[in-house]
Amino acid sequence: TRIVLATHNPHKVQEFAAIVAATRPDLEVVGYDGPEPVEDGVTFAENALIKARAAAAHTGLPALADDSGICVDVLGGAPGVFSAYWAGHRKDAAANLDLLLDQLFDIADPHRTAQFVSTIALVLPGGAEHVVEGVWPGRLATARAGEGGFGYDPIFIPEGQPGGAQRTAGEFSAEEKNEASHRARAFAALVPLLVAV
Ligand code: ITT
């Protein structure tokens, strides 16, 4: 069965392809290159639905979309839905990361808690809609480490690492990240809803 993934972020496509292949190898994930809708929602769920509805309408296929971001406790949950544009409208991942580090320069370790959130919307051809969420708790490092992943991965230290390790998600292998991440957790919640697909 074909399912369209409504994202223009190649890193997300890669992660999804691996996560889906591990659980539902029968699904063929196809990319979406149709018109990009305006993401003017103020929640992850609204934005995920906006993207999935646009792809479902344009392709006639079941459509998945991920809206995600990093939520920093001491910033009241920001950057949140603004994660991709935190340092301005250019979607500059390095500038976003540097700005976030700067904003927390004064904040000591016990208060540097944060979580990655992935919200996935599924829109089926009959019109049924589902939204699921996955959360990956951790803390922010004080400097970047690692070249893996994308976005804020080099400054995010996931909780619960084997042996109490303090690596950033940027130091995780792709396989390791895909077993633990917010995206993997959201997808796990989606699996039972995909029985109809
Ligand atoms: P699409 O809308 O096309 O899916 P996007 O990257 O613009 O791509 P979002 O609006 O959902 O998607 O923004 C998500 C941002 O949150 C992303 O650009 C990163 O800055 C951050 N982010 C999300 N998941 C991440 C992850 O697994 N690792 C690091 N940063 C992540």
Image: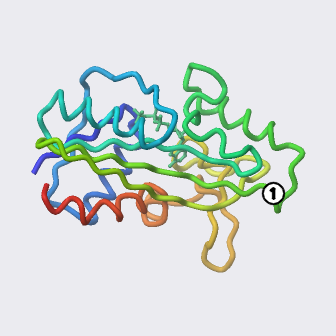
Ligand 1 closer than 8 Å to the CB at disc 1?
Answer: no
Count of number-bearing discs? 1
Residue 162: name its quadrant. bottom right
Please give left or right for residue 97 compared with residue 188 in the image.
Answer: right
Query: What is the x, y in percent for residue 15?
Result: 38, 51
Q: Quadrant of residue 66?
A: top left
Q: Is residue 167 rendered to the left or right of residue 81?
A: right
Q: In which quarter of the image is residue 99?
A: top right
* Residue shown at the point (18%, 30%) measured from the top left: 57
Which residue type carries mark 1?
Answer: His
| The C terminus lies in quadrant | bottom left
Residue 51 lies, in percent from the top left, at 33, 33
Query: Please, what secondary structure does the residue beneath circle 1 have?
Result: helix
Q: Residue at x 72, y 35 (%)?
A: 98
Percent x, y for residue 78? 66, 41
**Residue under the image location 25 percent in, 66 percent down:** 192
Q: Position of residue 152 (x, y in %)?
A: 61, 44
Determine which residue is flagged by label 1: 111
Q: Looking at the picture, tell me which residue is in the foreground, 71 or 25.
A: 71
State the residue in front, 87 or 135: 135
Residue 35, relative to residue 149: is it above or below? Answer: above
Q: Is residue 50 left or right of residue 57?
A: right
Q: Please give the name of the residue rendered at 23% of the width and 42% of the height, measured from the top-left corner.
A: 63
- The colour scheme applied to this rendered structure is rainbow
User: In the depicted view, which residue is nearer to us: 114 or 149?
Assistant: 114
Q: Is residue 103 above or below residue 135?
A: above
Judge the density around disc 1: few (<14), some (14-19), many (≥20) Cα neighbours within 10 Å.
few
